[in-house]
Image: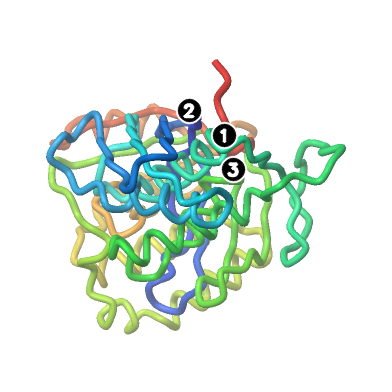
Amino acid sequence: MEGRAAALGAGTVLNALATGTGSAFGIDVETRATVELDPDAADVTGEIAEAPTADTELIERCVALATERWGDGEGGTVRTDSDVPLAAGLKSSSAAANATVLATCAALGVTVGDGDPDAPDVPDAPDVPDAPDVTRLEACRLGVTAAREAGVTATGAFDDASASMLGGVTLTDNTADTLVRRDVVDWDVLVWTPPERAYSADADVARCANVAPMADLVAELAREGRYAPAMSVNGLAFSAALGFSPEPAVEAMPHVTGVSLSGTGPSVVAVSDPADPETDLDRVRDLWDDREGTVRSTTTRSDGARIRTD
């Protein structure tokens, strides 16, 4: 009983800490999970390849909840390895949860597909001739439950998790775990990650609530499909609320379609529309290369998480 899966990292359009409404977009970095189930095992043991001493409660809880719901409570092992840096604002927890839940489904022989009667239709989803046992949004919500129970998120992060699971850009109501809107975007992406780390569960939620009027403005822009300007407004508001310098975003603004602090930081993510001749991510890379930390070039992805058969 073995299953493997991969899920996307993501960048932020709207941080949900202020109002419970959030928006994020999938990017081409992945976390991979391998789950081996044993009907005779009472517990689940986890391992994070790039951080052997890191807390594994989230991925262990994902396996336990999935086998309770769709299996017979099997125990076993789960191992993740990732291109998504931990605690950097790039949705490493959501990616790990999604990959683990899908890998557990694969180990159980449970089919996973698109379509959810409680959510809007997902644009550009592949045709599914037969109804799956589990929809991707159901799997996503189970991972969000595990994240809340493990205490790794202040909001439940359904916005981050939905972008990681579905790809594209999503707008969500995190208070009800509902998908408000999803769109496909085709952006080039540049990510600057400084050496320090920031954990979502440690974010000052009360201070973030002070920027709720700005968050409402960002949400209005996102509902109109104006995601790139929305993320720039979000970046300025939440950099101030969370105590990060807005300078990396400000210096990028003349050269990009949108730029924001991602999640609760510390990464800053800039995007450009390849069809816009006014954008110049190479110029931003030159600026950010002078800063301490790492700079990564990538793209958006619209396919989302997947069960691996390779």
**SS for callout 2:** strand
Q: Which of 256 and 13 is in front in this view?
A: 13
Mark 2 highlights which residue?
2
What's the distance in space between the residues labelled 2 and 1, CA to CA? 7 Å
Q: Nearer the viewer, residue 264 or 130?
A: 130
Above/below status of 154 relative to 159: below
Marks 1 and 3 in Cβ contact (< 8 Å): no
Q: Earlier in the sequence, mark 1 or mark 3?
A: 1
Mark 1 highlights which residue?
106
**SS for callout 3:** loop
On the image, the x and y values in percent for residue 59 come to 35, 47
Give the foreground label among 3 and 2. 2
Marks 2 and 1 in Cβ contact (< 8 Å): yes
Mark 3 highlights which residue?
167
Q: Can residue 118 be seen in this view?
A: yes
What's the distance in space between the residues labelled 1 and 3, CA to CA? 20 Å
Q: Earlier in the sequence, mark 3 or mark 2?
A: 2
Quarter that holds the C terminus? top right
Which numbered marker is on residue 79?
A: none
Marks 3 and 2 in Cβ contact (< 8 Å): no
